[in-house]
Image (cartoon, rainbow, N blue to C red):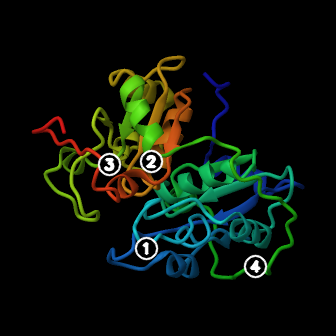
């Protein structure tokens, strides 16, 4: 069990920090799944963002290019050089503080939180509830784009462990592998994005949408602990791995587990990587394989 230091910051606390002599760097990672209706992340940033925040693209800067054969998933690990350029452009400095946010409830922001820590940035937090919570608390927004900053951070790729398909299968056998997708995708009754429906054999389902309230803020830590305990997930228990469709919403589940005091490892490629190999077994609620 890790020392429980929250990775969240409230809108009120962030306002106070931004008024301090040493404010954190703000990274806007508003994002919408490709093909979803409505404005995309860049358009959302252009319409309204926190003053001083720089937009970072989840698809091209917090993830790498998708392989032709699909191996590695739809959001593979980012190229360290590309990520470092994005972080320096945002003003991230060695040892500095960073706050990431999206429009709420924090799926993309959690991905940024995880990627930055994987890259060796230690002091990174998520604005709880995102831009929605910020504006609800009376926080100001702007359409002004800040000048390009001059950060000096050096990306240290691999600062967090990751799972691949083989190690995810081991966690499913020897620990708890959590599928963070919606129940109908886990069951195999529907699959709107990936070419194969179902789940990794041995995985348990815990939709990440159930980790937050109607306001987009994460549930209190004790409620999250109770939720995960009901699935056999506890601090100092068996190893825990998490996957989703492409490694984005799974990061939100990791954030919830962190707040509950439970260490877990991300299967970055997630289901989109798993099904890229037709020889890998697939389970549904009506089958064991």
Q: With respect to residue 271, does 146 lie above or below?
A: below
Asked if the residue at tag 1 contacts the one at tag 4, i.e. Cβ–Cβ closer than 8 Å, the answer is no
Could you tell which of marks 1 and 2 lies nearer the N-terminus? 1
Q: What residue sits right under mark 3 in the picture?
A: 181
| The C terminus sits in image quarter | top left
Tell me the distance, in whole angstroms, between the alpha carbons under discs 4 and 1.
36 Å
Tell me the distance, in whole angstroms, between the alpha carbons under discs 1 and 2.
23 Å
Q: Which of marks 2 and 4 is in front?
A: 2
Q: Nearer the viewer, mark 4 or mark 1?
A: 1
Q: Is mark 2 on a helix, strand or loop?
A: helix
Q: How crowded is mark 4: few (under 14 residues within 10 Å), some or many (20 or more)?
A: few
Q: What residue sits right under mark 4 in the picture?
A: 146
Q: What residue sits right under mark 2 in the picture?
A: 250
Could you tell which of marks 4 and 3 lies nearer the N-terminus? 4
The x, y position of residue 225, in whole percent, is 45, 25
Tell me the distance, in whole angstroms, between the alpha carbons under discs 4 and 3.
36 Å
Task: Judge whether residue 284 can be spotted in this image.
Answer: yes
Q: What residue sits right under mark 1 in the picture?
A: 68
Tell me the distance, in whole angstroms, between the alpha carbons under discs 1 and 3.
24 Å
Q: Is mark 4 on a helix, strand or loop?
A: loop
| The N terminus sits in image quarter | top right
Residue 195 falls in which quadrant of the image? bottom left
Q: How crowded is mark 2: few (under 14 residues within 10 Å), some or many (20 or more)?
A: many
The x, y position of residue 177, in whole percent, is 39, 34
Q: Which of marks 1 and 2 is in front?
A: 1
Could you tell which of marks 2 and 3 lies nearer the N-terminus? 3
Q: Which of 249 and 118 is in front in this view?
A: 118
The x, y position of residue 274, in whole percent, is 36, 52
């Amino acid at each position: 069990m890790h020392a429980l230091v929250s990775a969240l910051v409230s809108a009120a606390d962030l306002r106070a920090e931004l008024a301090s002599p040493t404010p954190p760097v703000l990274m806007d990672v508003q994002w919408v799944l490709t093909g979803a209706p409505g404005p995309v992340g860049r358009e959302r940033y252009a319409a309204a963002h926190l003053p001083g925040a720089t937009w970072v693209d989840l698809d091209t800067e917090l993830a790498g290019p998708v392989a032709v054969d699909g191996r590695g998933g739809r959001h593979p690990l980012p190229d360290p050089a590309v990520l470092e350029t994005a972080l320096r452009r945002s003003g991230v400095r060695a040892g500095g503080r960073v706050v990431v946010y999206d429009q709420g409830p924090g799926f993309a922001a959690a991905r940024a939180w995880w990627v930055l820590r994987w890259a060796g940035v230690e002091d990174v937090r998520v604005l709880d509830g995102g831009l929605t919570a910020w504006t609800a608390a009376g926080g100001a927004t702007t359409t002004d784009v800040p000048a390009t900053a001059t950060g000096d951070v050096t990306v240290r790729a691999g600062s967090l462990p990751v799972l691949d398909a083989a190690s995810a299968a081991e966690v499913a056998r020897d620990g708890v592998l959590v599928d963070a997708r919606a129940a109908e995708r886990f069951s195999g009754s529907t699959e709107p994005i990936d070419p194969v429906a179902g789940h990794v054999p041995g995985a348990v389902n815990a939709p990440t949408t159930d980790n937050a309230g109607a306001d987009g803020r994460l549930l209190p830590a004790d409620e999250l602990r109770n939720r995960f305990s009901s699935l056999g997930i506890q601090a100092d228990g068996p190893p825990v791995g998490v996957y989703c469709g492409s490694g984005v919403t799974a990061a939100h589940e990791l954030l919830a587990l962190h707040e509950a005091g439970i260490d877990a490892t991300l299967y970055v490629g997630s289901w989109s990587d798993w099904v890229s190999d037709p020889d890998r077994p697939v389970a549904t609620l009506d089958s064991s394989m």
